[in-house]
Amino acid sequence: MSTMPAELGEVFRGFFQEYSIIRVKWRLYKQLFGNTECIDLLNRHGAHGFAVVQDVLIKDLILCITRMTNTSKEAWGDPANLATLLIDLVAHRQTALTDTLKGIRDRIKPVADGLGRWRDAQISRNDYASFVAMKAGIDALPPPSRQMVEDILSAMSEILDELEAHYPGLQERHEDVSHAGEFEQLVSHLRDYEGRRADPPH
């Protein structure tokens, strides 16, 4: 184990920040669109608006994932890109760690590419009439694609585990910490509102 060099630390922070943001976006997505009961609730109070939120979250989330896992030379130098971190690790002669991280990256790369192709296909079918008529749905991001996101985030967490084992004292992760202003309270308010309407005070 050793201390991470300062210049490598700058690259790591870019990767870590992007990972942390993706985790928050995915948690927000699941708070709103994690089950059919919640989706039905949202559709009763703002079907189109929540459908747009769902659509934007899905496409942005997948864009962030493909940005992190892109192996093309055009992505090298992007601090959020894993390849940038791997290149810098090689420059610091951390070949064994680099090989371990490459193995994890290569394992999930086909999954991330599949998500990217799915996103591109959705965008290519954009249609105004369908857009203004849409409502939130459990299959807006199909279950297999949801599992892909979970698998990719799990692999990213595995990469951070390896880095933390090699370089002690890295930034602490707060993957399951909720933040003020998230959607759980909104969903709770909507449920309370419907309960009061169904059983008004006498």
Image (cartoon, grey):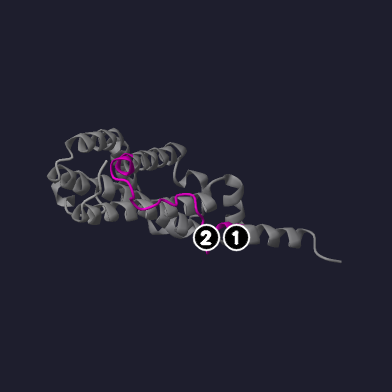
User: Is residue 25 at least partly visible in the picture?
Assistant: yes
Residue 173 drawn in magenta? yes
For label 1, count other residues whose C-alpha is less than 10 Å away and answer few (under 14), some (14-19) or many (20+): few
Give the image location of residue 94, x and y in percent.
18, 40
Residue located at (29% from left, 55% from top): 13
Q: Are marks 2 and 1 in contact (CB under 8 Å)?
A: yes
Residue lying at 45% horizontally and 41% vertically, measured from the top left: 142
**Residue on which disc 1 sits:** 185
What is the three-letter code of the residue carrying label 2?
Glu
Task: Bin the neighbour count of mark 2 within 10 Å (Cα to Cα): few under 14, some 14-19, many 20 and up.
Answer: some
Which residue is under mark 2? 182
Please say whether residue 79 is visible from this viewpoint: no
The residues colored magenta run 162-187
**Residue drawn at x 56%, y 45% as measured from the top left:** 35
Viewer-side residue, 127 vs 144: 144
Q: Is residue 174 magenta?
A: yes
Q: Is residue 120 left or right of residue 33?
A: left
C-alpha separation, residue under disc 2 versus residue under disc 1: 7 Å
Q: Classify the position of the C terminus by image quarter.
A: bottom right
Secondary structure mainly formed by the magenta segment: loop
